[in-house]
Amino acid sequence: MKRVRKKSTALFCLILSYTLSSVAEPQKAAIASAHPLATEAGFEILAHGGNAFDAAVAVSAALAVVEPASSGLGGGGFWLLHRAKDGFEVVLDGREKAPLAANAAMYLDEQGNVIPDLSKNGALAAGIPGMPAAIVHLAAKYGRLPLSQSLQPALRYAHNGFAIGARYQRLLQSRLQVVAQNSEAARIFLDNANVPASGFLLKQPDLAHTLEKLAESGAAGFYQGEVAKKLVSGVQAAGGIWTLQDLARYQVVERQPISGNYRGIKITSVPSPSSGGIVLLETLTILAGYELEKLTPTTQIHLITEAMRRAYHDRAFYLGDSDFVKIPVKRLLSADYAAGLRSTIRMDKALPSAALRGELTADTPGTDTTHFSIIDSVGNRVAATLSVNFPFGSGVVVKGTGVILNDEMDDFVSNVGQMNGYGLVGSAANAIAPEKRMLSSMTPTFVEDKTRVGILGTPGGSRIISMVLLGILDFAKHHSPQSWVAVPRFHHQYLPDVIEHEAGCFSPETLQVLTALGHQFKQTDTPYGDMQAIELNKQTGQLSAASDPRGEGLADVR
Ligand code: DON
């Protein structure tokens, strides 16, 4: 009996992989990014004979210039790649690392309490950047054009300037005090100590110079020599702990993507040091046991919330940088484990998060960012999510470099049991250690079923994973990418024990029913996320691209 089942499972997998593997060439290309100038940069490089990977270099660098609040050379990210000619898939991990002089207690006072904002504002909050190393690697190993060519659009934007818009103003306003404290950041990003008016031409000649060094000398142009010296002395003068050795030792890492299935859909996403892929797949594996489409919308929301609660709980307990801690990935993503978790989900009652097993102890084992999606005319794909963490990162720009330092150190657990900037808790698995990568929620993802391929991702801190999840559940309904990026958003992350949601996400009746089940709610002040998505029809090669209506991005097919 077992053997027969094994055989038929093998046959099913064979058929599935055959149907999944036959993909028509799109003929055209599609790019979706959070800023029109970044999307244009990508198309420009494709027009010059670049492939999707060259375009990804151009878009990443352009975003570093035109979306300085969200990502940049002083930050990091994850680039998920699919090469059409042989189906090879890889994640470029350009996540920041803790400096060599970092330690687990570096943000605590003598009583062991977290010193407010020390991991968020100022030079001590900055991890060693990974973005420059990642784009150099991407160009050299996967691209067709020299870096000097794919960095051209970004260089132009930095030299000639670009007109800032409402999003820049809003994000700067949210970090005004921090940016104003650093004279170099204030000089570049403010207009006479104020948020500039819409249309203000922002020029960044120092950043252009740093990009030129990168174009000339590759990674050494940033991690060694003149730029590195400026960065280290600037960071140290501002109270940080970087050394030249930190920069010289930074390495981008190629990691095998993490993948799984949800009711006939193959999902491919990022492994540790992002929690994105693991939490996404764990949630979907729990949900795969239900026929969601046959249930009432309210029951669906209840079950999705209960699945998120359990997967984010495991995030808090087990996840950290897998180069440092052992993560039971296989177990967390197994069908048996999901079935066990499902057996704890009641249809008529929310489980209080406090009732979930265990207490976070120090010895337990183990808002702002950007995403873009690209496919070129032969089917090479990129999904990339990049970050400096909070808007304008740590608020520090090192003089003469134009580089905004990230504040990604806040993604570590500064103190077990205390929440970080996104309200996330965690265990020793995500404690600070020299050269360790802080746990991320970034979730650039590919989805694929018999007839379609999807590329998606978004910024949004801890809510990134739940946004990608809701996008995938919408893909499962055969809706368009315009719909995935627009779905009303809700989120549960285990602690705090509330469903956060956008205004208008739930009807009063739905809220009433869910409240009766024991759920609590918190409406977010504003809509959240900035999803960028692409869909390929595998049979016709037709492309469709969508940019989140909440943002100012541009998605196009050309
Ligand atoms: O890596 C992470 O999970 C965070 N640093 C991402 C931050 C973010 O998305 C902020 N966006 N609104």
Image: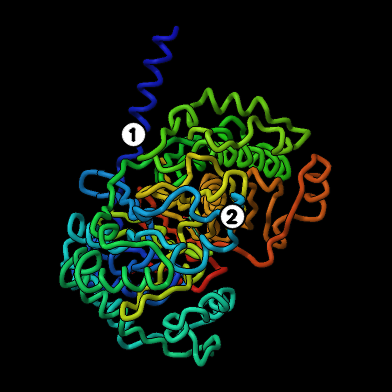
Which image quadrant for residue 307? top right
Pointer 1: what residue?
17
Which residue ends up furthest to the front in the rendered image?
A: 110
Residue 514, numbered circle:
none
Q: Residues within 10 Å of mark 2 (few under 14, many from 20)?
A: some
Q: Residue 61: x percent and y percent?
A: 32, 70
Look at label 1 and name its amino acid. Answer: Ser
Q: Is residue 353 above or below residue 539?
A: above
Asked if the beta carbon under badge 2 is closer than 8 A to the nearest atom of ligand 1, the reply is: no
How many marks the image carries: the answer is 2
Q: Work out whether mark 2 precedes mark 1 in sequence or the reverse, and give the earlier one.
A: 1
- Towards the viewer: 321 or 461: 321
Look at label 2 and name its amino acid. Answer: Val
Relative placement, left or right, of 189 versus 81 is: right
Is label 2 in a helix, a strand or a loop? Answer: loop
Which image quadrant for residue 448? top left
What's the distance in space between the residues labelled 2 and 1, CA to CA?
50 Å
Pointer 2: what residue?
114
**Can residue 439 be seen from the camera position used here?**
yes
**Can residue 545 be seen from the camera position used here?**
no
Q: Residue 405: x percent and y percent?
A: 40, 68
Q: Residue at x 34, y 34 (%)?
A: 17
Q: How is the image coloured?
A: rainbow
Which residue ends up furthest to the bottom in the rendered image?
A: 192
**Quadrant (top left, top right, bottom left, bottom right) of the C terminus:** bottom left
